[in-house]
């Protein structure tokens, strides 16, 4: 009897094309960020975001992002004096952009850290951690192994 096919055996075939569900277009489209900021200004879980560059980013700097960009492509970070700090290239340079207040990622051992979590039907479904010495996390950033264990299996180290 032949072994059952693995998911990778199916998904990596040239004949198979996988599409994201349509609902993912809304949260992945950065045009939602200025709208959320206008509805919930100064909310602690949001950053100031706008469709046009204006006053108010002087204290922290700002980031320019393509509205439908992905994976850190075509991101520009400016300091509080509007000086370019870093930028990435990519295929989204001809799109409309948003401007968002800069908030640095946490740094651990010289690496910028981004924790990504996923849910399905409102329930935790997974997580990953990406790290990079660069300020912008991209698909080329390292993906660290992550293991979730129950609280009772953690040892008290004090």
Image (tube, rainbow, N blue to C red):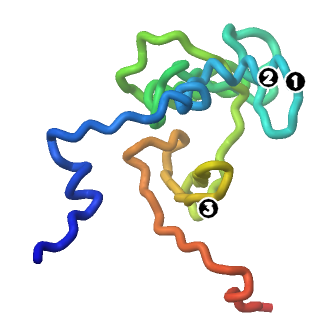
- Point out residue 31 in the picture as x, y percentages from the top left corner: 63, 18
- Point out residue 116 in the picture as x, y percentages from the top left corner: 58, 51
Asked if disc 1 and disc 3 are in contact, CB closer than 8 Å, the reply is no
Q: Quadrant of the C terminus?
A: bottom right
Q: Residue at x 29, y 58 (%)?
A: 7
Judging from the image, what secondary structure is the residue with disc 3 in?
strand
Query: Label 2: how many residues lie within 10 Å, few (<14), some (14-19) or many (20+)?
Result: some
Furthest residue toward left: 1
Judging from the image, what secondary structure is the residue with disc 1 in?
loop
- Point out residue 104 in the picture as x, y percentages from the top left corner: 67, 42
Residue 83 picture quarter: top right
What is the number of the mark on residue 37?
2
Asked if disc 1 and disc 2 are in contact, CB closer than 8 Å, the reply is yes
Q: Residue under label 1, please give it.
A: 41
Judging from the image, what secondary structure is the residue with disc 2 in?
helix
Q: Is residue 84 visible?
A: no
| N-terminal-most mark, 1 or 3 | 1
Disc 1 and disc 2: Cα gap in Å? 5 Å
């Amino acid at each position: 009897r032949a072994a059952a096919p693995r998911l990778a055996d199916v998904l990596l075939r040239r004949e198979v094309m996988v599409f994201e569900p349509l609902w993912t277009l809304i949260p992945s489209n950065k045009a939602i960020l200025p709208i959320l900021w206008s509805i919930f200004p100064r909310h602690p879980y949001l950053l100031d975001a706008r469709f046009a560059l204006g006053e108010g980013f002087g204290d922290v700097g700002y980031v320019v992002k393509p509205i439908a960009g992905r994976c850190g492509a075509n991101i520009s970070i400016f300091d509080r004096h509007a000086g370019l700090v870093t930028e990435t290239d990519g295929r989204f340079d001809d799109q409309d952009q948003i401007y968002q207040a800069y908030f640095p990622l946490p740094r651990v051992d010289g690496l910028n850290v981004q924790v990504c979590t996923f849910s399905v039907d409102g329930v935790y479904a997974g997580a990953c951690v990406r790290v990079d010495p660069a300020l912008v996390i991209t698909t080329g950033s390292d993906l660290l192994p992550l293991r979730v264990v129950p609280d009772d299996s953690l040892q008290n180290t004090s």
